[in-house]
Amino acid sequence: MLTRRRVLGAAAGGALTTMAATLAACDPPSQPSQPSGAGASGGAAAPSLDPSNWASVRAQFALTPGVSHLAAFVFASHPAAVRAAIDTHRAGLDADPYGYIGANEAALDKAVATAAAAYLQTTAEQIAFTDSTTMGLGLLYTGLRLRAGDELLTTEHDFYATHEALRLRQERDGVAVRRVRLYDEPATANAEQIVARLRSAIGARTRVVAVTWVHSGTGVKLPIRGLADAVAEANRGRAEPDRVLLCVDGVHGFGIEDATPEALGCDFLVSGAHKWLFGPRGTGVLWGRVEAWPRLTPVIPSFTGDSIGAWLEGGVPRGPAGPAATPGGYHSFEHRWALAEAFGLHRAIGTVRVAQRTRSLATALKDGLAAMSGVRLHTPRAPELSAGIVCCEVDGYRSREAVARLAAAKVVASATPYATSYLRFGPSIVNDESDVEAALKAVRALF
């Protein structure tokens, strides 16, 4: 396997063929190896995990005790296994960065790709790794092959990262960008209306539909499978270059919903891994359907062996699409490599149980808020149209004022980062029923 160190070393020696013979005798280690002097991992021993016990799951996180952390999804706290893995890799890199990368990069990159593929129930060749949802969206909407007159259709409900990525593409290439309103009131949104509005908005020049799985400003979860069916209808009879691609910002469904990209029916799915997955900070994924990847040109040179090896030989890279779209260069290796442990934690707990747990806590929170006079719930009550995000308004309080009052009561909530801002909660696997009760009690105390 070609690694960064081996390829660059071969380039310095000017002998790719000699390197290939050397690599044949070099199998990557099955476990990370520390160079002499690397020392211990530097982290406290991880508490034992009983994935069937939610208290044991909560104990994996070093969150401040006595506080109800209902905004933990905004930027993840690392669970114990992730912390330990980061410490191990950081110690090795600090002791001998060149040696540690050379000894471990191939095996650790493969371990992360394998873990991600197992979690998504897909192949490693379909996954590119990024630093965040925003980076993934930028790579996607910059790299899609479009022609003059093509249209990118998005919604009024999407976040800044999607809107700005599309605006920048429009500014560079002059492609058209249009927005559609999928629902009028989030609390009363329904799947049939959402699908119908998107279906009617797709035009003859539409080539990309850019949507978000779960809206961070309202908590509305779009029926992506239904939208995919509407896109499939629009694609009937279209030539391949004219087919509409369904691209999804999946960050607030990824790590919480029990649905694979294939089951959703989208062409591309983008997500950070440092929110609901509670993965290492500064990690993310860009997944693409096999048939969709040819419509995207990588934006940043990859450092895969296929890519650099082809350059050394004067050729063009022909390797798998996902790795070829993964930005190269040196990055936060200790965080990228610890991503395998985050996927492992969720698979140990079970994606169905994670989804059920989050749904149960969010439903209890919505029910309690909806019963209060002076509180207007904006997130749909129905689980099929909502996930873990719960948004509301409290009479007499701006969202940030409510957040500050709740923080004083040891309840951590957030304010949605939109022009119209709501008070937002996000119960997750780090919470239990007492956190929901604490939040409801703190909201009642505002009156």
Image (cartoon, rainbow, N blue to C red):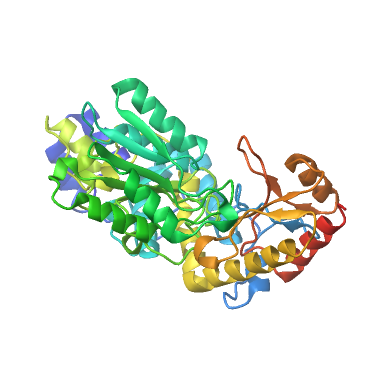
In the rendered structure, the answer to whether residue 301 lies left or right of residue 21 reads: right
| Residue 356 percent location from the top left of the image | 55, 72
Quadrant hosting residue 330? top left
| Residue 39 percent location from the top left of the image | 56, 51
In the rendered structure, the answer to whether residue 214 lies left or right of residue 447 reads: left
Compared to residue 189, the image places residue 131 above or below, namely above
| Residue 193 percent location from the top left of the image | 43, 56
Q: Nearer the viewer, residue 82 or 201?
A: 201
Q: Residue furthest bottom?
A: 52
- What residue sits 78% from the left and 61% below the top? 372
Residue 251 showing in the rendered view: yes
Q: Nearer the viewer, residue 203 or 31?
A: 203
Q: Nearer the viewer, residue 425 or 25?
A: 425
- What residue sits 88% from the left and 56% below the top? 445
Q: Nearer the viewer, residue 333 or 412?
A: 412
In the rendered structure, the answer to whether residue 421 lies left or right of residue 270 reads: right
Residue 84 showing in the rendered view: no
- What residue sits 63% from the left and 77% below the top? 53
Compared to residue 303, the image places residue 61 above or below, namely below
